[in-house]
Amino acid sequence: MNIKNLSSILSSFLAATLSYAAAIPVESDITEVSLFQDGALIIREAKIDVEAGKSLAHFKNLPSNVDRNALQAQVIEGSGVVVRNAKLFIPEDIEESPEIEELRKSLLKLDDERAAILKSQQQAKNRIAFAGSMGESFAKNFGTISEGVSLDVDQARKTWEYIQEITTKGNDEVAKLTNEIRLVDERIEDVKKDLDKTLQSFNKLKMVAEVELEAVDQTTITLAVGYIANEARWQPKYELRARPAEGLLDFGYFASVWQNTGEDWGDISLTLHTNHANRQGNAPELQPLRVNQSHYRPYYSKDLNAVQRTRVSSSLEMREEATKAELGEAVVSSSSVSFQVELPGAVDVPSSKDHTSLPLLETPLETEYWSEVVPKIQLDAYLKGKTVNKMDLPIMPGQAIAFVDDKLSSKVYLDKTLPEEDLELSLGVDANIAVKRREGVQKKSDSGFLDKTTTLRREFYNEVSNFHSVDHKVVVVDQFPVSQNAKIEVRRLGPSPAEVEFEKNEEEEQDLGIFKWDVSLKSKESKTFSTRYEVVYPRDWQLWPEL
């Protein structure tokens, strides 16, 4: 290689290096947040003056805990500029902020101030100690100055007063300085807290998004970057207001939003997604079940832990097609993988350890109400309701606070319920339904010389009273034993199959022995439901469980 070629290569390398040496620090604002149940897709926008040729744009102070593989960048306004590359990194030589530097200086100054006060306090204590030793010496020698020479009474009194004065002033000064130390310690603790909080915020916002741009001519563009921050999530909360007399349920849908990314989300467009940003996206594959000797281990060729990341650019592209929320009304949409609800107007969600509650939807649902009781287990009846999810948004698994006739009833858990899917609710104890359970015949008898069997006879009576002011539906649940052995016979004496509805295992069509009465009771009406059966089994057997 000759000198001319080497010089040309070095010049090209130097030119390329210089073209990226001065990265453009951009001022950006968060405009959109798509919040998932395990992360947030954050969109930032910046207006940038771009020179002709290649340049780098730096979006600084981004959350440190972000997915480095999910950064996307896109020019959304302007032309003649191409995004060549984008990456996330934390600079090695990042400098602390001036605020942190000032707090450190304040802390050092307070430490010096405390040390000076401690020194003064120690000097005061030394004077007190000197006065004390002087007093002890004076008392021990009874005022003797030298051999044959002693203090007279007036001199002794003045000497003692002098010692007392030094001691009193010293104690007052020590007390004063002790209080000053306490005040300085309080100021030190306050500065330490501020410094710790500032350092936490600083450490949370170290990431830099670097975008490589190439422009034909000098121009101005609006550049958007999107990244996934992990310290953010939302979960559903519900408020159920049951109105049994009207057959309605006011369903309140809320979002408990949390983010501690370090950056405040102020005046943003917020969309909540029902899916997860980081959940495994690969569908499971059932592998062949090869049976062989125990030392054989089946080989699985697929990596079931591969994670399919959500593409940030999809959010940027969807913005042009998305329906904007009208003021005061959330807009629900859906895709093949999730439902989304865009909150109305601009939303503020500060970075904090606390949750923020945001209302999403509220709608009245026509609901069928009844009270259900299982007297064998518990004498409390529970108000239940059945409705259909008429909202466009699925009910996600979460906790609900239930009110009945505007009175707090209980906390209940809701399972996932898609739009137009049936929803059955338990709304807490119904105090207007009284239940009593008593035993009837409890008899055990032996019979037969050949078969040698034992017969158990059992009777139970469940009395249910309706104290609602209106007619009310009641479901009473009870059961017969179910034999698991051909030598054990269960004779069902009552109720008859026509009186009740039996529960079955739908998969196996197996009789579970569980049944229920479904009746409507008038106000103040009582009704008794009886369960009677016999169990016949070999006399020398013991039944388990005991009946």
Image (spheres, grey):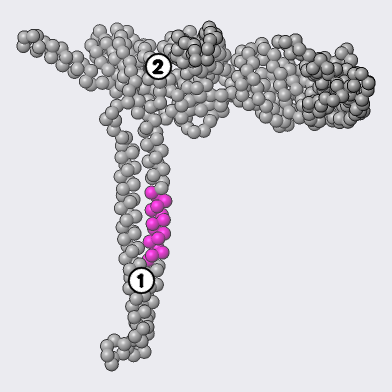
- Left or right placement of residue 533 versus residue 510 in this view: right
Find numbered disc 2 in the image and state the secondary structure of the residue it sits on.
loop
Secondary structure of the magenta portion, mostly? helix
Given residues 250 and 457, the one toward you in this image is 457
Does residue 528 lie above or below 15 as drawn?
below
Q: Quadrant of the N terminus?
A: top left
Kindly identify which residue carries mark 1: 128
* Residue positioned 69% across, 16% down in the render: 423
Kindly identify which residue carries mark 2: 70
Three-letter amino acid code of the residue under disc 2? Ala
- 520 falls in the magenta region: no
| Residue sitting farthest toward the left | 3
Given residues 522 and 446, the one toward you in this image is 446
Find numbered disc 1 in the image and state the secondary structure of the residue it sits on.
helix
* Residue positioned 47% across, 18% down in the render: 278
Percent position of residue 412, x then y: 67, 27
Q: Which residues are magenta?
A: 173-188
